[in-house]
Image: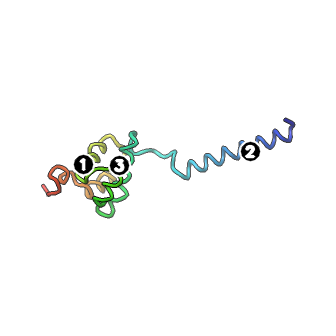
Amino acid sequence: MNSREYRQYRQYRQYRQWHQRRRAGWIGSDRERNHPDREAEHLIEFAITWAPFGGAAEEEILVRFGMATRRFIERLWEVIPESNCAEDEISTLASAYPRGIAKTGGRSL
């Protein structure tokens, strides 16, 4: 490899590294996760996404996670204590997915 080829190779490597760092920042792979467990992470992010709309529809929960709404809410509140969720996120989740519904099968306490 002559000096010209080496210079091109170095430029190519620098470009690839820059591109990978840029892409990682764009897709958010370097962000702090809400939970160390991947399944719990999906559950929390799904719940946070639907919380402003009063929670996800029963059909959407069934299709996405294969569980009934009651079980989804139970599982959500099992993983929240171990999560890195902020207090405002937890209060938003509490208003959209109240714990009492999970225990009483849809009836208020």
Q: Could you tell me which quadrant the N terminus lies in?
A: top right
| Numbered badge on residue 43 | 3
Using the numbered discs, state the Cα–Cα distance from disc 1 to disc 3 in whole angstroms: 12 Å
Residue at 35%, 44% in the rendered image:
40
Residue 64 image point, x, y percent: 36, 53
Colour approach in the figure? rainbow
* Total numbered labels: 3
Using the numbered discs, state the Cα–Cα distance from disc 3 to disc 2 in whole angstroms: 40 Å
Q: Is residue 34 above or below residue 92?
A: above
Residue 54 image point, x, y percent: 29, 62
| Numbered badge on residue 79 | none
Residue at 35%, 49% in the rendered image:
43
Q: Amino acid at mark 2?
A: Tyr
Quarter of the view holding residue 94 = bottom left
Label 3 crowd bin: few (<14), some (14–19), many (20+), radius 10 Å:
many
Residue beneath label 1, please?
Answer: 71
Query: Closest to the observer: 64 or 47?
Result: 64
Using the numbered discs, state the Cα–Cα distance from disc 2 to disc 1 in whole angstroms: 51 Å
Answer left or right for 102 relative to 89: left
Residue at 81%, 41% in the rendered image:
7
Residue 25 image point, x, y percent: 56, 49
Q: Earlier in the sequence, mark 2 or mark 1?
A: 2
Q: Earlier in the sequence, mark 1 or mark 3?
A: 3
Residue at 14%, 57% in the rendered image:
107
Query: Outermost residue toward the bottom?
Result: 53
Considering the numbered disc 1 on the image, is that residue within a helix, a strand or a loop?
helix
| Numbered badge on residue 12 | 2
